[in-house]
Image (cartoon, rainbow, N blue to C red):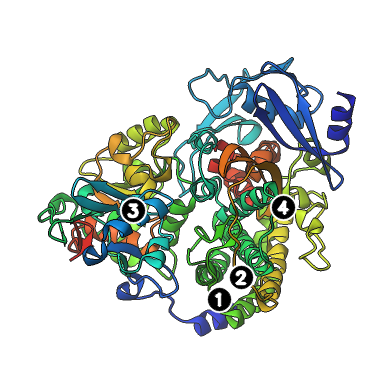
Amino acid sequence: MSLMQTLRIGRLARSLEDLLRVPDHAFGYPLLRPEGLTEEAQEALLGLCPSGAFFREGRTFGLDLARCVGCGRCALARPEAVGEMKRLEVAVTRKEDLVQRVDLERGTFLDPGPPPPPRPELALPTLAFREVSAGDTGLADSEVALAGNPFNDMGRFGFSVVASPRHADALLVTGPVSRNMAEALRRTYEAVPEPKGVVAVGNEAISGGVFAGSPEVVGGVDRVVPVDVYVPGDPPRPGAILFGLLLLAGRVRQRLVGGVLR
Amino acid sequence: MDAVKEALREGRPVALFPDGEGVVLVAEVGRDVRVFHLGEGRRFPSLAAEFPAMDWWERALWERGYTPEGHPNPKPLRRHDLPFAFRAFKELHEVPVGPVHAGIIEPGHFRFSVLGERIVNLEIRLGYQHRGLLALLPGKGPEAALLLVERAGSEPLAHALAFAQAWEEALGRKAPPRAHALRRAALELERAFGHLGHLAGLFTDIGYAYGSTQVGRIRALLQGELDRLTGHRYGRNFLRVGGVWREGRPDLSALALYREELARLLPRLLKHPQVLDRMRYVGVVRRVEAEALGFVGPTARASGVARDLRQDDPAYLSFQPVVRQGGDVLARAQVYAEETLQALDYALHFLTHLPEGPLAQDLPPGDGEAMARVEAGRGEVFWFVRVAGGKVALAEGVDPSFKNWRALELAVRGEGLPDFPLCNKSFDLSYAGNDL
């Protein structure tokens, strides 16, 4: 019975191309439309975003993907000013690449230049990860765990999650880093042998997310340990996490530059 | 004071939170909720010596600057800047575990006192996930507040639902019937998804790979349907104060198919000799313990306490709580399995009987206060909100995990140390929900 059932179910793993797409029914990542950013649209966007992802600095208008909770209300209310990126290749090695900045005078995106290359010493055929939850609600942790399920199957890329930091090549850290976890995170990082990497998974791990103002959190993994790859999302889907791990291993090219897929 | 004691003797605490200089105690007696205002000048009489259920509540208030007068052993729960002395046993070996664990789970510290392999005592120290969530809420509008509320525990839909209902009631409004049904459908899908996660984890922990893979497979497919309904893999950004934001189209025939597959699969898995061998008579929580310490949700129901908040909800036709008397890991697994099927039945019912009408009504900024409770997968979620001018003036939430953590301390007593992960997974409590 069990064997028959297994044979009937067949192979579950989805292709990487399939995993890196945001499904039709869900909102992906917002993308500013420079041509639609009228004065009135800017005001509306600043007012309606519940997490304060939009900002204005002098003559630039911006959108911080690390502050976006992905509700999609901006794109619904102001389709002329905000579009959508339906891809999960959003992991970056440089935090500035998560911010879209539009020069309002010229109506174009500002280009921060080419991102730094991935670290060659981590370009290994297999990578072992230790996951550290540091103030995460449990959902980003859950997505990391699900990245190893038969559908996403991170094992096929040579990635595994190990029990001890001593056996790990890199840390996957979730959450805004509560003050009470900062020391534990630091010591876990020190226990990982060189060369070692760190992946910050989720918006809270990148900059504190909705907890950014709380005195009880440090407000980002990179304030405690150096971070190599940032994976935005709230929480990021397993496909986005997989892309981040591939980026850490130097097997894919970073596609998000200046907040725009290029 | 006599009325307070009677309520706690007959019932259990639902919430204890500060309001200005006094504290508010909410207790459930039978199916009624009673509210008491205690103390003044940031001092209130401690009840923990007589009612152990009050212990953690009073400690949580103590570290927030309120004095429970006469508390036998005040020590911090969430704050790590205050001294914390573990209970020490001479002659016993101590095994510290955590905060960073071997699996992919949240941080917490467990201090075992063992005699050989046997656990004599476990003391849990949490607070690693403390993010000061409650302190961020005052001054927030409904949308910004909901973002925080959705992060108050690993069941965002249940928390958002309780908060939204409290807000609506504070303003004397109701969500439209269609939103009401959609909210409940999403809540039941969240419950099924969570329960299957507990079951898959249990099978992993006893090395039953077939069980964990099969349950995990259906769970992942089910998550896809939750994603279709709410637009988020965990149902965030779906609820709003006044209704819901959107209405997705889950595949109802697929949901029915998963339900049928689970109905065949789960009873078979739970009868497997390997499962019975590892789960039966392990990690027992007795009914008297569950009642005295005020446990909620599947933890209480697996120990014979027949209480489920859905009993009070007229939307759930002919609702019967799932109860087991064993109190062991197997009983909790059986409750998860049966409640999963029940949850999918109700989700399908709500989704096939959607009333016509709008998805939300806009609520004017107003004033008022109210509390609401929702039966989440792990038990009772509580939110109280006081609204002033459309903003939060005071908000207080309680995740069911806060009420259930001590069940783990009791369950592992006398068990072998290697059975700890199994016992822990059988409750599968939220650390962030406890630490807020």
Q: CA distance from mark 3 to mark 2?
A: 28 Å
Look at mark 3 in the image and give the residue it sits on.
Answer: A43
Name the subunit of mark 2. B
In three-dimensional space, the C-alpha distance between marks 2 and 4, rounded to whole angstroms, equals 34 Å
Q: Residues within 10 Å of mark 2 (few under 14, many from 20)?
A: few
Residue located beneath label 2 in the image? B358
Q: Residue B285 at x, y = what percent?
A: 75, 43
Between tags 3 and 1, which lies in front?
A: 3
Tell me if label 2 and label 4 are in contact, CB under 8 Å.
no
Q: Chain of mark 3?
A: A
Circle nearer the N terminus (2, 4): 4
Which residue is at the front of the view, B296 or A215? A215
Q: Residue furthest left?
A: A113
> Would residue A169 be visible to someone looking at this image?
no
Name the disc covering residue B298, or none.
4
Q: Is residue B175 visible?
A: yes
Report the number of discs. Answer: 4
Q: Quadrant of residue B258?
A: bottom right
Q: Is residue B116 left or right of residue B31?
A: left
Q: Mark 4: few, some, or many residues within 10 Å (few <14, many ≥20)?
A: many
Residue at (74, 55) in percent of width and height: B331
Q: Is residue A95 above or below residue B358?
A: above
Can you say whether B68 is above or below B255 in the image? above
Mark 2 residue type? Pro
Looking at the rendered structure, whether the residues under marks 3 and 2 are on a common chain is answered as no
Measure the C-alpha gap from mark 2 to mark 1. 19 Å
Residue closest to the far front: A40
* Quarter of the figure that contains the C terminus of chain A: bottom left
The spot of residue A37 in percent (x, y) is 26, 61
Residue tagged 1: B250
